[in-house]
């Protein structure tokens, strides 16, 4: 049970538990920041005109383009696959 809930997914993306926790927490912080700036941009369109797009691009670069590829790693159960220019086999 511990293996399934805490270790399988981090290992499938080439990370340990705490490394994966740190990565996921950084993504969470950037997503929260992106939500806040988009909220203020919705109210005042002159504010944060490029910040939301920049955050999304940064997250995309980290998750899809620059992620470590783990040879032979199977995708996690229940993960979704994006069928675009790039693809990823896991979700945070």
Image: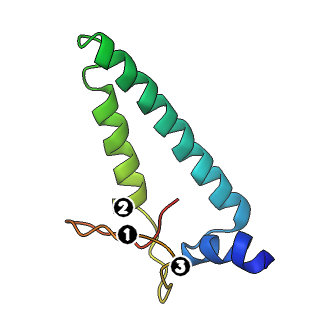
Q: Quadrant of the N terminus?
A: bottom right
Q: How far is mark 2 from mark 3, CA to CA?
A: 19 Å
In the foreground, 8 or 19: 8
Residue 62 is left or right of residue 13, and the answer is left
Q: CA distance from mark 2 to mark 1?
A: 6 Å
Please, which residue is most extreme toward the left here? 85
Q: Note whether 6 is above or below 54 in the view shown.
A: below
Q: What kind of element bears circle 1?
A: loop
Toward the right, the furthest residue is: 2
The residue pinned by badge 1 equals 88
Mark 2 lies on residue: 64
- In x, y percent, where is residue 75? 48, 80
Q: Is there CB contact under 8 Å for labels 2 and 1?
A: yes
Mark 2 or 3, nearer chain start: 2
Q: Of tags 2 and 1, which is closer to the observer? A: 1
Q: Dot 3: what SS? A: loop
Q: Nearer the viewer, residue 26 or 66?
A: 26
Crowd around label 3: few <14 · some 14–19 · many ≥20 (10 Å)? few
Q: Which mark is residue 67?
A: none
87 sits to left or right of 34: left
Residue 66 location in percent, x, y? 39, 60
Residue 81 sits above or below residue 55 on the image: below
**Label 1 Cα crowd, 10 Å radius (few <14 / some 14-19 / many 20+):** some
According to the picture, the residue beneath numbered tag 3 turns out to be 77
């Amino acid at each position: 049970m511990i293996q399934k809930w805490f270790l399988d997914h981090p290992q499938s993306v080439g990370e340990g538990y705490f490394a994966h926790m740190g990565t996921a927490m950084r993504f969470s912080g950037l997503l929260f920041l992106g939500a806040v700036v988009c909220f203020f941009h919705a109210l005042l369109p002159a504010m944060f005109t490029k910040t939301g797009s920049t955050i999304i691009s940064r997250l995309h670069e980290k998750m899809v383009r620059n992620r470590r590829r783990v040879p032979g790693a199977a995708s996690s159960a229940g993960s979704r696959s994006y069928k675009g220019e790039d693809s990823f086999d896991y979700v945070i």
